[in-house]
């Protein structure tokens, strides 16, 4: 199980599955947070999330992504080491490829319409916003790390757009949902985002819970061909239900650093 769980944690951390937050025009706490790596003594204090993250327009379309694990650290080893940490070493400097896409969405899609009580909508509706296609992205990432034969489905809870459920073979399930987020736009070609998410991995015999903080700094280049590069840091924290939780004193038990590269996929441009 440790090997499988390690693959799942690595896959989930490979690319950010982000939701909405307020926009900042200048560098701020997220830039500082990245600069402090690996000295993350406590997780970020983020506001609770509602809705979805809107990306810059240059994310629009389908991309061929390459994720490479550059480094992993267990700050509390050998006293506390997360399941699958050692098996994740096989991914260091190994590139994993998958497709992701970012799609336009109607910002008023959550408005409830009734044939007896149609709401009055303003004539100057905002333009469609760019969001991650979480089901598409989650399925491709899971298949890349776990093997397509081991992934039955990836679904988004229709009542909670921040909740993703990955159903695996042999009655195994990974549930992840965002609890907090923030983002910054230091420059027109840069985008930084962070999120906190709760993850629950269930099998017929066990349940494993943790909290994941993921911070990613994206850089866009339009010439000679569009390209997005990113540095991503993921930190794993134990849940309060873990018997070692109080021994950690709120510190991360695992840190992962990735390099992400996205180039346009030639099959579809949304």
Image (tube, rainbow, N blue to C red):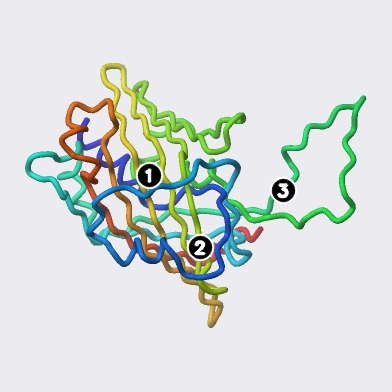
| Residue 59 in sight | yes
Please report the residue visible at 68 percent of the width from the left and 54 percent of the height from the top: 104
Q: Is residue 219 above or below residue 75?
A: below
Q: Nearer the viewer, residue 82 or 2?
A: 82
Residue 141 horizontal side relative to residue 35, left or right? right
Q: Is residue 87 above or below residue 223?
A: above
- The Cα atoms of the two marked residues, 1 and 3, are separated by 27 Å
Q: Is residue 53 above or below residue 4?
A: below
Residue most extreme to the left: 78
Dot 2 or dot 1: first in sequence order is 1
Percent across and percent down for residue 170 are 34, 22
Residue 241 horizontal side relative to residue 62, left or right? left
Percent across and percent down for residue 131 are 60, 52
Q: Say which residue label 2 marks.
A: 184
**Which one is in front in this view, the residue at disc 1 or the one at disc 3?**
3
Q: Say which residue label 1 marks.
A: 12
Residue most extreme to the top: 204
């Amino acid at each position: 199980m440790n090997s499988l769980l390690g693959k799942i944690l690595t896959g989930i951390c490979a690319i950010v599955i982000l939701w909405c937050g307020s926009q900042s025009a200048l560098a701020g706490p997220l830039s500082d947070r990245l600069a402090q790596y690996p000295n993350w003594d406590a997780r970020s204090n983020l506001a609770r999330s509602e809705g979805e993250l809107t990306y810059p327009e240059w994310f629009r379309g389908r991309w061929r992504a390459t994720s490479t694990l550059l480094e992993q650290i267990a700050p509390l080893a050998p006293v506390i080491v997360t399941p699958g940490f050692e098996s994740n070493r096989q991914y260091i400097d190994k590139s994993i490829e998958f497709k992701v896409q970012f799609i336009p969405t109607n910002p008023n899609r959550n408005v409830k319409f009734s044939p007896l009580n149609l709401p009055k909508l303003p004539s100057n509706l905002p333009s469609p916003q760019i969001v991650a296609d979480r089901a598409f992205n989650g399925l491709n990432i899971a298949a890349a790390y776990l093997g397509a034969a081991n992934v039955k489905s990836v679904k988004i809870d229709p009542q909670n757009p921040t909740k993703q459920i990955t159903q695996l073979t042999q009655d195994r399930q990974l549930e992840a949902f965002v609890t907090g987020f923030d983002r910054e736009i230091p420059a027109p070609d840069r985008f930084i985002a962070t999120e906190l998410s709760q993850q629950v991995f269930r099998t017929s015999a066990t349940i494993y819970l943790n909290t994941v903080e993921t911070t990613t700094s994206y850089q866009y280049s339009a010439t000679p061909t569009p390209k997005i590069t990113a540095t991503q840091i993921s930190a794993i924290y134990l849940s309060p239900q873990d018997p070692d939780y109080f021994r950690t004193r709120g510190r991360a038990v695992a840190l992962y650093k990735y390099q992400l590269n996205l180039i346009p996929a030639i099959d579809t441009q949304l």
